[in-house]
Amino acid sequence: MAILVYDGDCGFCRRCVRWGERRWRDVAPVTSTTYQATSSDISADDLASSVWWIDEGVRFRGAAAVARAVAAAPTPWSYLGRVMMLAPVSRVLEPGYRFVVRWRHRLPGSGACRRPR
């Protein structure tokens, strides 16, 4: 079973995870705080800076993690996720992901989201 580690304090992140929970079958979403309390294989700073996808010991962060989370949803989302993993698309998605991380506190539904460092 894959694990998605996300920022449980951010309303935008929580909304995105709720979207996935309605679709995923074999994904366990875990907040970064919970993951940090049970595992020390990813630093607190790294957990605070990105979403993480962990599947069979292989880790992906940022846009690569989001692509895998989308690909884990049923069709048609799985196709979109696979396209997001392709080299031309993935190179564009990472700067887009960083933009969202930087400005997520201003996105709709961000709620108690902390302004990133």
Image: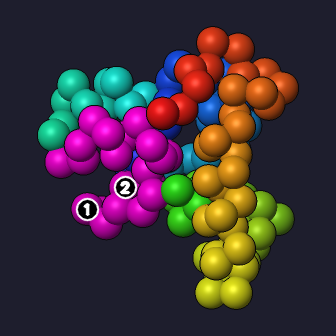
Residue type highlighted by circle 2: Ile
Residue toward you, 35 or 73: 35
Q: Residue at x 71, y 59 (%)?
A: 96
> How crowded is the residue under tag 2: few (<14 C-alpha within 10 Å), some, or many (20+)?
some
Q: Is residue 72 left or right of residue 29?
A: right
As drawn, 114 above or below 86: above
Which residue ends up furthest to the top in the rendered image?
A: 112
Label 1 to label 2, Cα distance in Å?
A: 6 Å
| Residue 111: percent from left, percent from top | 70, 14
Q: Secondary structure at mark 1?
A: loop
As drawn, 23 above or below 72: above
Q: Residue at x 77, y 27 (%)?
A: 106
Magenta span has 30? no
> How crowded is the residue under tag 1: few (<14 C-alpha within 10 Å), some, or many (20+)?
few
User: Which residue is tagged 2?
Assistant: 54
Q: Residue at x 49, y 46 (%)?
A: 51
Whether residues under marks 1 and 2 lie with C-beta atoms below 8 angstroms apart, the answer is: yes
| Residue 98: percent from left, percent from top | 62, 53
Which quadrant of the view contains residue 14?
top right
Q: Which residues are magenta?
A: 41-61
User: Which residue is tagged 1?
Assistant: 57
* Residue 61 shows in this picture: yes
* Residue 73 shows in this picture: no
Which residue ends up furthest to the left in the rendered image?
A: 40
Residue type highlighted by circle 1: Gly
Magenta span has 49? yes
Which quadrant of the view contains residue 95?
bottom right
| Residue 61: percent from left, percent from top | 45, 58
**Number of on-image labels:** 2
Q: Secondary structure at mark 2?
A: strand
Q: Residue at x 62, y 65 (%)?
A: 94
